[in-house]
Image (cartoon, rainbow, N blue to C red):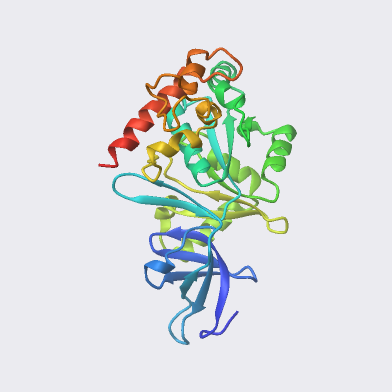
């Protein structure tokens, strides 16, 4: 460990309020506090931190947040909620039951696209045959979505995960830092317990470090699946509301691959894809049954979000 007056780099592995847990290069964890707003860190940040002077306890101070590769966040009318930084992908976990919100799913996907982070969709509870079949059909537009980076949609049964499930997850997660998002009841805890050895121990250590007891259920946490290969999961709450006020309405089409695929076919360069004549997007909605058509539900989500984001500008 470094002396108190020497700065060293570390990885933020947990946050709760303004407190952070920083993991040092030798794997030790230290509570740190930001020195001013510019040093406010999120999970996944690389930071420079400094230990306390002798006799002033074991806690440290974050002196600087190093440059981020990306930041995944949501923003409503009141505040911004940052989930994690420097991540490779976002795994959006939904389930056959309870019935998932397609609007909520779309918002998370749009936020990932806006941050240039690859999204991955997983549908859990394959054992619920009929509900799963209905949910899988609802995901048809996402399974066939093209673009530069097509969405991959996984079918999982995490409660009774078999070798195939494990192999699929290992293939998709290997060597990547993955933020896991999911509504209540989707199986997020089951997924993390399946993949992270000793997760309860790690959670307890972080809870003890932050001295926040039950309140750490609201904290974001980084878990190593395999430190050597760089495979990690980031567990974060807060999927119920997903504001996109940081995205301009004119940027929305570019963040929805099925809409973007037809946006260049419009007569007008500044087409909103809502009412203009000669709109390639509207034509694709009217021909939704075609292989590259746009589903009515997806277009409704686009229209509603365009109106919502337009209102926030005034």
Front one among 233 and 266: 266
Q: Residue at x 51, y 47 (%)?
A: 115
Left or right side of 33 for 7: right
- Rendering coords of residue 133 (x, y %): 58, 17
Give above or below for 115 relative to 273. below
The foreground one among 85 and 189 is 85
20 lies above or below 1: above
Instruction: Provide residue 109's location: percent of width, then percent of height.
Output: 51, 37
Q: Is residue 312 visible?
A: yes
- Is 274 located above or below residue 227 in the figure? above
The number of numbered discs placed on residues in the rendered structure image is: 0
Residue 241 in sight in this render? no
Q: Position of residue 256 (x, y in %)?
A: 50, 33
Quarter the C terminus occupies: top left
Horizontal and vertical percent for residue 28? Answer: 59, 70
Judged left or right of residue 197, residue 84 is left
213 or 313: nearer the viewer: 313
**Residue at 61% in and 17% down:** 291
**Residue found at x 54% / y 27%:** 258
User: Quadrant where the N terminus lies?
Assistant: bottom right
Q: Determine the residue positioned at 42% across, 44% down.
A: 238
Vertical order, 310 against 143 (above or below):
below
Camera-side residue of 233 and 259: 259
């Amino acid at each position: 460990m470094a002396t108190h007056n020497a700065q060293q780099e570390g990885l933020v592995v947990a946050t709760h309020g303004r407190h952070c847990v920083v993991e040092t290069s030798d794997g030790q964890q230290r509570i740190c506090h930001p020195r001013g707003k510019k040093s406010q860190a999120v999970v996944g940040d690389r930071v420079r931190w400094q230990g306390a002077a002798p006799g002033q306890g074991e806690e440290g101070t974050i002196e600087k947040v190093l440059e981020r590769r990306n930041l995944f966040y949501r923003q409503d009318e009141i505040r911004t909620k940052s989930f994690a930084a420097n991540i490779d992908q976002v795994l959006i976990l939904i389930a056959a039951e309870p019935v998932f919100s397609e609007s909520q799913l779309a918002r998370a996907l749009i936020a990932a696209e806006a941050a240039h982070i690859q999204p991955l969709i997983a549908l859990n509870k394959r054992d619920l045959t009929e509900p799963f079949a209905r949910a899988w059909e609802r995901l048809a537009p996402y399974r066939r979505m093209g673009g530069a980076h097509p969405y991959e949609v996984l079918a999982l049964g995490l409660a009774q995960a078999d070798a195939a499930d494990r192999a699929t997850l290992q293939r998709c997660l290997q060597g990547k830092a993955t933020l896991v998002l999911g509504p209540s009841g989707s199986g997020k805890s089951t997924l993390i317990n399946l993949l992270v050895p000793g997760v309860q121990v790690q959670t307890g250590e972080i809870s003890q470090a932050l001295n926040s007891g039950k309140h750490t259920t609201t904290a974001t946490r980084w878990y190593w699946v395999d430190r050597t290969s760089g495979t990690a999961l980031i567990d974060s709450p807060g999927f119920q509301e997903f504001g996109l006020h940081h995205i301009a309405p004119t940027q929305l089409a570019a963040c929805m691959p099925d809409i973007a695929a037809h946006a260049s076919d419009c007569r007008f360069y500044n087409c909103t894809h809502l009412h203009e004549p000669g709109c390639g997007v509207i034509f694709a909605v009217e021909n939704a049954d075609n292989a590259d058509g746009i589903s009515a539900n997806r277009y409704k989500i686009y229209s509603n979000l365009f109106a919502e984001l337009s209102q926030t500008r005034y």
